[in-house]
Image: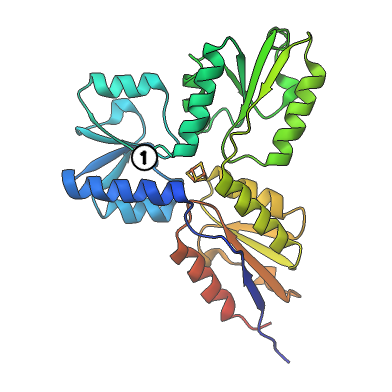
Amino acid sequence: MTFNLNIEKARETGFCFGVRRAIEILEKAAREHGNVETLGAVVHNEQVMQRLAKLGITAANSVDEIQGKVVAISSHGVSPEIEAELKQRGITIVDTTCPLVRRAQTTARKLTESGFSVIVYGDAQHPEVKGILGWTDNKGLATLDAERIPASLLSSPRLGVLSQTTQIPEHFAQFTGKLAESSLTDAEIRIVDTICRDVKERQAVSLELAKKVDLMLVVGGRSSANTKRLAELCSVAAETHQIETAEEIDPSWLRDVRRVGVTSGTSTAAETVEAVLKKLKAVKV
Ligand code: F3S
């Protein structure tokens, strides 16, 4: 006897407001200017980048690779130095920085100006984090491991801590807790929660769903930080696989599975999620 899989989609999937906004700004810029180059991938999603390429929107990996005169800053934002360099080269900037990333940048700048040594809880290699560090006059430190914070920083009398927008709130709280324990002085520690509300909401609904199913599929780009976090979170409650497209579903994952949950990162198009659901619906177990 065969059964249809019981498939449930998380309440929130597809683009977050920041990515939707960035794509709208870019499409408008492409209509106005023809070709537009983006500094780095405007969103960390291969399928979205391919669709934008058809509209004349291409990615340059660095300022030196820029060929044209219209450049878009991605939703992850950039440092003030890069903004200044683009302006100095006479380039027209199309700014798609997400307002919530801008808030993290502004927080970093205000803390620095108020004399705090800034620590960013985040992946130091991620473009968003590199950009935020630029707003600390490059004096800040980014890390995911409180034990790696050097003693010179731990002896600072004023420590300001914020987070990459896509991190898991509970992990950020553990990080700040450890930091407070390891501070070497009676430091004033100011913690600002800069985790994105869309990310928090998506993490909460995805975890809720993961608790009810046998298998979770998290749809999103392999280089997408928030998709990775989502998969990490769901794997605590159910077997979880991160996939970019429906084609990556391995039938062996569905053996002995009755209930499947589907969620997505914030830079995943709704159509990609729909294609995954369609493929799952066709499976008989
Ligand atoms: Fe912005 Fe949050 Fe999306 S920071 S780009 S709304 S994941």
Compared with 273, 2 (above or below) is: below
Q: Quadrant of residue 271?
A: bottom left
Instruction: Please give the name of the residue rendered at 58% of the width and 75% of the height, measured from the top-left corner.
Output: 280
The colour scheme used here is: rainbow
Residue 270 seen from this side: yes
Residue 124: x %, y % from top left: 57, 27
The x, y position of residue 260, in whole percent, is 67, 70
Look at 72% across and 20% down and name the residue there: 148
Q: Is residue 139 visible?
A: no
Q: Residue at x 49, y 32 (%)?
A: 103
Q: Secondary structure at mark 1?
A: loop
Q: Residue at x 24, y 41 (%)?
A: 36
Which quadrant, please, contains the N terminus?
A: bottom right
- Amino acid type of disc 1? Thr
Q: Position of residue 214 (x, y in %)?
A: 75, 68
Q: Residue furthest right?
A: 181
Q: Which residue is mark 1?
A: 96
Rendered view: 14 above or below 151: below
Image quarter (top left, top right, bottom left or bottom right) of the C terminus: bottom right
User: Could you classify mark 1 by the number of other residues whose Cα lies within 10 Å: few (under 14), some (14-19), or many (20 or more)?
Assistant: many
Total count of labels? 1
- In this view, the residue in front, 93 or 115, is 115
The image shows residue 175 at horizontal and vertical percentages of 74, 29
On screen, residue 283 above or below 252? below
Q: Is residue 40 above or below residue 85?
A: below
Residue 254 picture quarter: bottom right
Q: Residue furthest bottom?
A: 1
Viewer-side residue, 83 vs 239: 83
Q: Is residue 10 left or right of residue 238?
A: left
Judge: label 1 CB < 8 Å from ligand 1. no
